[in-house]
Amino acid sequence: MKIAVLKERSSGETRVAVTPETVKKFTALGAVVAVESGAGLTASISDADYAAMGAILGDAATTVAGADIVLAVQGPEPDLLAGVKQGAMLAAGLDPFGQRARIDAYATGVIEALAMEFMPRITRAQSMDILSSQSNLAGYKAVIDAAATYGRAFPMMMTAAGTISAAKAFVMGVGVAGLQAIATARRLGAQVSATDVRSATKEQILSLGAKPIFVEKVAGIEGEGAGGYATEMSPEYQAAQAELVSAHIAKQDIVITTALIPGRAAPRLITDAQIATMKPGSVIFDLAVAQGGNVEGSVQDQIVERHGVKIMGYSNTPAHLAADASALFARNLYNFLSAFWDKEQGRPVLDEEIGNAIRLTKDGAVVHPRLLG
Ligand code: NAD
């Protein structure tokens, strides 16, 4: 059983899909792990670190030659996988809707492509969930970078020269990233408020010591919604939310937006007119910028200034914390494969619930219902 890991080639990608820790664990399962030379460098992992745990280092072609499983952060170009075994598994964040041509090419190449972002949000799959592990870090990093860009301090400080008041931070969208953003802003000493369309998040906001700011006139999403995810809201709800945001945002120094709707563009939560009411020097970090943006005027990987307010957001926030993001991503992949490892066959055998949820291609065809529609 050969597991291959290539250097990531997507622009701005700094993460790597295995770490020395997971190389050691895969080796203990009886697998041979081949890693392309230099694959870990951007995540502060040297070839020697991998070799010390038993990995075989080589160029891209020798790394994938005869591989049974390829692990990656983002889907590799199909040409790179020419040497793998017929029917080899590829487990990665495959961006199934954005990279459809690539998925078709995996099918043609008889690769079994497994989209880790389709992992069901069920208790037993929590440790395999790349969206959670990466969003958590992204929520933290958004606050840290917003704080670095902000020209003032976060905590209240009483000094001999006078008092500095605490920054006011507002988190919009309280999923995994939003919860970590609240916790991080609180730790830095900000006064934090937060909002979501799912009423279940109110209690979570309160438990982190932040203030919930919710639309009360129109009902939001009760319970956990569809798999815990939000849907697009009615025009009435959107109008009530716009009114609420307008009243609240003018008093905020830092705004972190994280709102996503699966399979759709991110909802627009902040307009240019609302930004114009904010104090000069305020900072907005748009974590949804790569999905179309929650904030009017946000541009990926740039700091845009509008009405004296800085709007920032990265196309790939976890890549700005490469070492930790790689460590957690690699553990998600290990937890996934090891949970299904069949000792007798010496390979993973997926069950129906998880296999059918994440398998995009098999035996030369695209098989996932969301791609066949
Ligand atoms: P997400 O990244 O899809 O969205 C971020 C947040 O934005 C969500 O809380 C969403 O409700 C909110 N949002 C969407 N539209 C909005 C709008 N117009 N205004 C304000 N907020 C808006 O969410 P996520 O972090 O992936 O979490 C989604 C759900 O999945 C949560 O309920 C979370 O607890 C759950 N979850 C479960 C597991 C598991 O059980 N394995 C793992 C991770 C997350």
Image (cartoon, rainbow, N blue to C red):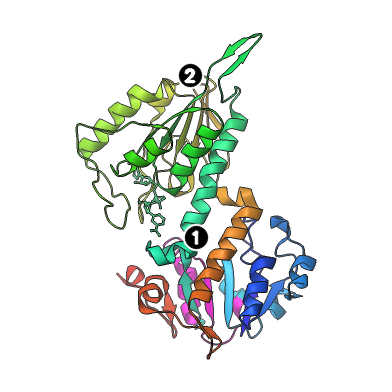
- Label 2 CB-ligand 1 distance < 8 A: no
Which residue is label 2 attached to?
Answer: 279
Q: Nearer the viewer, mark 1 or mark 2?
A: 1
Which residue is label 1 attached to?
Answer: 130
Image coordinates of residue 221 in percent, x first then y, are: 25, 45
Q: Is residue 44 left or right of residue 280?
A: right
Image coordinates of residue 282 in percent, x first then y, are: 51, 24
The residue located at (53%, 75%) in the rendering is 338
Quadrant including the N terminus:
bottom right
> What amino acid type is highlighted by mark number 1?
Ile
The residue located at (54%, 84%) in the rendering is 347
**Stretch in magenta:** 81-108
Q: Quadrant of residue 361?
A: bottom left
- Marks 1 and 2, how far apart in space? 36 Å
- Label 1 CB-ligand 1 distance < 8 A: no
Can you see residue 12?
Answer: no
Residue placed most toward the observer, 212 or 257: 212
Quadrant including the C terminus:
bottom left
Packing grade of label 1 (10 A; few <14, some 14-19, many >=20) is many
Can you see residue 204?
Answer: yes
> What amino acid type is highlighted by mark number 2?
Lys
